[in-house]
Image: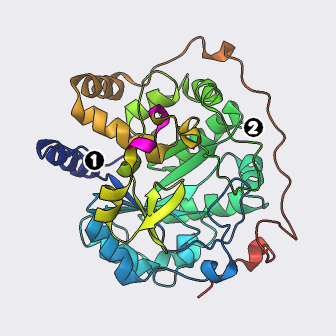
Amino acid sequence: MGVPLSQMWSVASYVLKQKLRGRKRYPLVLMLEPLFRCNLACGGCGKIQFPAAILKRQVSVEDCLKAVDECGAPVVSIPGGEPLLHPQIEQIVEGITARGKYVYLCTNAILLEKHLSRFKPSKYLSFSVHLDGPRADHDAAVCREGVYDVAIAAIRTAIQKGFRVTTNTTVFNNTQPEHLHELFDTLMQMGVEGMMISPGYQYEKAPDQEHFLNRHQTVQLFRRVLGKQKRSWKFNQSPLFIEFLKGNWQLECTPWGNPTYNLFGWQKPCYLLQEGYASSFDELMNTTDWEAYGRSSGNAKCQDCMVHCGYEPSAVDMTFGSLKGLAMSAWRTIAGPSRHRESADLPLPSPVPAPHFVTLETSLRSERVPALSECVEVS
């Protein structure tokens, strides 16, 4: 696994404490969204479809740190929008790491090199750079040419300056396995600490609705992507989640495992669905009808979802909550990932053409999408 031992121990000891206390539901990763605005308008994203007045707002440093304290999770992921557009993002990160929490600052890396001086290398901080494939695939996914090269250059600089760098990759039904293999090889050669990979969730407001995977397609595709996984590839995800994506392990969603805090409060029930908000973490945990979510609930919105924010905490819980889960995780860590000799013969869904680049006007927002050279912060 592409995770430092100190972080693994911190998470493991935290989970074991929850088990000893008899807590059935507990958070593992806080999804902290300090703002929604972004300098990209990706076709598969459903997080930037808010009115301009909302996109100009941001969560204060004080409220961000209050949410961290309320939740108590050992890991904090800072997605967005683009977090580097927050004028006080370094203060948010400093406040979280000072509490001994591990931070994954998710970024498209357009502004990363410019703002590296605002941060200090730390075992508690990792920049998680979004990359959906090699150059052509990634630029198509984010709807703008040139972003891949900027991200790769920023990754190299951050690693040279001593920062932890991971990546996150979203997979859609037009993803070609061999292209991801090329990306994985490139990232490992560059010295990226670990990679995260997950199928995309079908956001209702995402402009591009043609490229999302159903559950059967997800398993087929991930068997092709990871069926002959190289030992050199390091994923900062649990072995059980990787096996789940390949259809080799059954997991049920635990939406409370990655609670979300943003401009509106604590999002119900999870990062992917917007079905109301709670004013406090305790209210979120105690008033949400958790039985109404997850595949076994019959909820139509959950049937095809296999996304990491719902199932990674399930995998971690099972690793430390059952002898079978612990044994499988240990075995996969020692022996390496399962390999599917038959996976090459599994039929893939017919690829759907990638979306055209958005260069001038976009239906995603009422305002023009800026060119790459025009991407600047909004205070």
Residue 166 pos. (x, y %): 48, 53
Q: Which residue is labeled 2 in the image? A: 174
> Residue beneath label 1, please?
25
Q: Is residue 28 above or below residue 367?
A: above
On screen, residue 222 above or below 15: above
Picture layout, residue 340 above or below residue 254: above
Q: Secondary structure at mark 1?
A: loop
| Residue visible at 21% across and 24% down in the picture | 323
Q: The residue under label 2 is which amino acid type?
A: Asn
Residue found 73% across the figure and 52% down from its top: 141
Position of 319 with respect to 265 (left or right) is left
Q: Is residue 233 visible?
A: no
> Around disc 2, counting alpha carbons within 10 Å, would you say few (fewer than 14), some (14 to 19), or many (20 or more)?
some
Q: Is residue 209 left or right of residue 30?
A: right
Quadrant containing the N terminus in the rendered view: top left
| Between 4 and 21, the one nearer to me in the picture | 21
Separation of marks 1 and 2 at Cα, in angstroms: 36 Å
Looking at the image, tell me whether mark 1 or mark 2 is earlier in sequence order. 1
Instruction: Tell me where the magenta segment starts and ends, as one range.
Output: 291-296
Q: Is residue 41 magenta?
A: no
Q: Is residue 280 left or right of residue 152?
A: left
